Image (spheres, grey):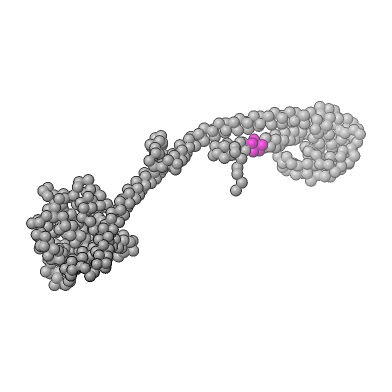
Amino acid sequence: MPDRPAILRTLRSRVIAVVVAFGLVVSAVLAFAVHLAHDSYSLELRRARATHFLDSVTSMYGDLLPLARLDRAQLEARFRRLVLSDPSTRLYLLDSRGRILAGSHQPAPVGDFVRTAPLLRALREPSDGALRADDPDEPGRLARFAVSPIAEDGRIAGYLYLVLGDGQAAAAEAAGLGYAKRTATLVGAGALGSGLILSVVILAIITLPLKRLTGLIESLRSRGFEASSGPQGLPRWGERNDEIGRLSRAFTDLYDRLKAQHDQLRALDAARREWIAAVSHDLRTPLTSLIGHLETLLLHAERVAPSERRSYLAVALENARQLNRLSTALLDLARLEDERFVLTNELIAPGELLDDIARRFRKDARDQGIVIEAQYPERLPLVEGDSALLERAIGNLVDNAIRFSPAKATIAINASATDGRVVISIADEGPGVDPQDLPRLFDRFFQAKAHREGRGHCGLGLAIVKRVCELHGGHVVAANRDGHGAIFELILPARGRAASPLALRLEHPRESLAG
């Protein structure tokens, strides 16, 4: 696309150019229209005066036709006297067929006949300014004319025919036309100037907000969200109800949304980098230990005692299991985050689910001197969802509670129903959670300080818990208890009727899921 001239590269200059061009076209059209109107008016006025003149002559001299037959020279002398005021005008007497009986022109006209069809039409349509008839002095030329009929016995016996000339009347018409053109030019120039002034004012009203918005966008593009003033740099245009106000509000909303997404992406990127560093460390630590023990066994197999070899293999196996837990957690989180993931729904009795989880973790807890108690009302509403996923989420919370609870502590797994929801809580007697970590505890890439001290989990367990709750239409919250420890609550929507665990086992028997 060819470049526009420099003067037309801005919206203001292009609009002004359009207004100027439009004003010039309007002025030209106005001048042309005035010329046509004045010409038509002048012709109609001359024809009306000429017709009135002819009617006066016809009424004054009622014996024109007999006089033309008796004394043509005398009649022509009268005609010349009648047109003395404008010698360019010529007066003729015609019979009913258009033959010239007398005329004011001297010497005698070249032609001796005028066609009567235009004369009859002029009598029928006196306002038709385009009519022309034969000029007896210049055969073949059509001239503007006026005509008045001469009647005898109720019929047209002849015509008084006047050819309009270009004498004094034409000069007066030319003077009037010049005045009309000057007036039209002045009016056009005034309209053009007023249009230009109005256009500049309107463009200033329109382009000033656009210029400010463009400046903010350029600042945002070159300096970013951190250095840009944002919508605060705009005047109070957002309070207007016109297009500028709607544009300002739309820009402000868009800026706020982009700013929030930008801040979220920055926080997510920072958390991702921190999480990758933590995952790398947690993967490297057991991997290094595993490689070291295996290399020791490989290089010094003959000198390592059987008991020591068994110890090395046990440590290597534990490190391999730790790597397996990390990789499994990563894969599980990726699977749950996939939009194509579909739950395997069934009706679940919360009490039965808690019994299964308590039974699965009771041995590990007993080995560390910890007691696990599961309590819930006899009849709880059912929960619709994926039993394996819910058991995995609750199991993650119970596993955390065991790892951070001291010996002789009690972990309480409770369930209750309220307002159409089932609340499952896990309370421990550990050190609790740093209050600064609570708002971000369930973020995907966030890892609380206490979790960093317990390597091998990378903060993925709580992220999995949160995602499982979201998939089931619920949410999870965490808080510190008044004494020692923390409490985690899974809040899920209730489905179906309330039922006891025993009744549900009889109706829908299921096996306990292993961890």
Quadrant placement of the C terminus: bottom left
Q: Is residue 240 magenta?
A: no
Image quarter for residue 411?
Answer: bottom left
Tell me, yes or no, if residue 257 can be seen here.
Answer: no
User: Quick check: 337 left or right of 211?
Assistant: left
Camera sees residue 6: yes
Give x and y (percent) for residue 26.
63, 37
At x 11% / y 55%, what residue is drawn? Answer: 406
Residue 494, compared with residue 81, is above or below; it is below
User: Can you say whether 14 is above or below 450 in the image?
Assistant: above
Q: Estimate the x, y position of residue 35 in percent, counting from the top left.
A: 70, 35
Q: Start and end of the magenta stretch?
A: 24-30
**Residue sitting at x 57%, y 33%:** 196
Q: Is residue 299 above or below residue 135?
A: below
Question: Which residue lies at the image location 81% right of the left edge and 27% below the top edge?
Answer: 85
What's the magenta bit mostly, secondary-structure-wise? helix
Please tell me which residue is depicted at 57% across the width and 31% down the height of the picture. 194
Left or right? Give the position of 19 relative to 362: right
| Image spot of residue 428 (x, y percent) | 13, 55
Q: Nearer the viewer, residue 513 or 416?
A: 513
Left or right of 443? Residue 135 is right
Relative depth, front residue between 206 and 474: 474
**Residue 374 locus on image (x, y percent):** 11, 61
Q: Nearer the viewer, residue 368 or 332?
A: 368
Q: Quadrant of residue 90?
A: top right
Report if residue 27 lies within the magenta region. yes
User: Viewer-proximal residue, 261 or 173?
Assistant: 261
Tell which residue pokes out farthest to the left in this image.
408
